[in-house]
């Protein structure tokens, strides 16, 4: 009697949006036309975990990896091949998950206005700020409100540090455009 190879289906990682405090769990199912599939975490199945495209060999055959193995910005893939007690099927991969950045960016510097503690319409404020983040910066929005509205548009930035030194004129709500 010839054995049909088992098939791996529904390969996934939970949580799908992890942080560096979450354990990662690999999930999968096995189907087999012979009906002799071994589902779940059986020692007959083989699993692999890939961090940033490179297999972490110390995590072979684990379906759960502890949060201590992950860092913000890591991209993980879970791979598994199932066994039907006779043969292995092919390896199948989950979609990737990226460990989210849970720390807020840091900023140093100041925003000054020569005439008062809070800017008024038509006044110029000077902004000298350094933004930094260990994973990287993508954008920022500066808003000064309380009827002194400076709504600095969303600015795209990159890298782990950004220095901003600008003079901005405070405009009234009547001067804003939609």
Image (cartoon, rainbow, N blue to C red):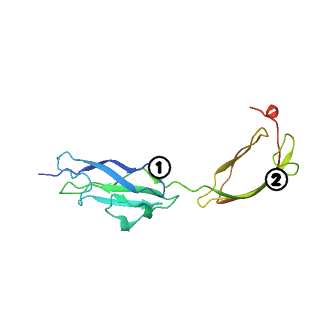
Horizontal and vertical percent for residue 132? 66, 59
**Image quadrant where residue 24 sits:** bottom left
- In the displayed structure, does residue 76 sit left or right of residue 116? left
- In the displayed structure, does residue 21 sit left or right of residue 149? left
Residue highlighted by disc 1: 17
SS at badge 1 = loop
Badge number at residue 112: 2
Q: Is residue 89 above or below residue 68?
A: above
Horizontal and vertical percent for residue 15? 42, 50
Horizontal and vertical percent for residue 102? 54, 55
Question: Front-most of 61 and 66?
Answer: 66
Mark 1–mark 2 Cα distance, whole angstroms, equals 39 Å
Q: Is residue 85 above or below residue 154?
A: below
Q: Quadrant of the C terminus?
A: top right
Q: Is residue 90 above or below residue 123?
A: below
Q: Residue at x 31, y 50 (%)?
A: 28
- First in sequence, mark 1 or 2: give its number: 1
Pointer 2 local density, CA inside 10 Å: few below 14, some 14–19, many at least 20: some
Q: Residue at x 33, y 57 (%)?
A: 63
Question: Front-most of 76 and 84?
Answer: 76
Q: Is residue 24 above or below residue 145?
A: below
Whether residue 124 is visible, yes or no, is: yes
SS at badge 2 = strand
**Image quadrant where residue 88 sits:** bottom left
Q: How many marks?
A: 2
Mark toward the viewer: 1 or 2 = 2
Whether residue 127 is visible, yes or no, is: no
- Pointer 1 and pointer 2: residues touching (CB < 8 Å)? no
Name the outermost residue toward the front: 117
């Amino acid at each position: 009697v010839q054995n049909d190879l088992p098939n791996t289906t529904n390969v996934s990682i939970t949580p799908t949006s992890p942080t560096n405090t979450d354990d990662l769990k690999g999930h999968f199912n096995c189907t087999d036309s012979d009906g002799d599939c071994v589902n779940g975490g059986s020692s007959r199945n083989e699993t692999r975990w890939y961090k940033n495209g490179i297999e972490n060999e110390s995590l072979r055959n684990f379906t759960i990896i502890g949060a201590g193995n992950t860092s913000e910005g890591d991209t993980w893939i879970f791979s598994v091949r199932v066994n039907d007690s006779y043969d292995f099927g092919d390896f199948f991969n989950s979609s990737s998950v990226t460990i989210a950045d849970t720390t807020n960016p840091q900023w140093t510097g100041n925003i000054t206005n020569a005439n008062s503690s809070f800017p008024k319409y038509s006044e110029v404020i000077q902004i000298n700020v350094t933004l930094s983040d260990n994973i990287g910066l993508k954008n920022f929005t500066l808003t000064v409100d309380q009827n002194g509205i400076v709504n600095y548009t969303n600015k795209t930035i990159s890298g782990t540090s950004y220095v901003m030194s600008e003079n901005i004129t405070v405009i009234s709500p009547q001067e804003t455009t939609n």
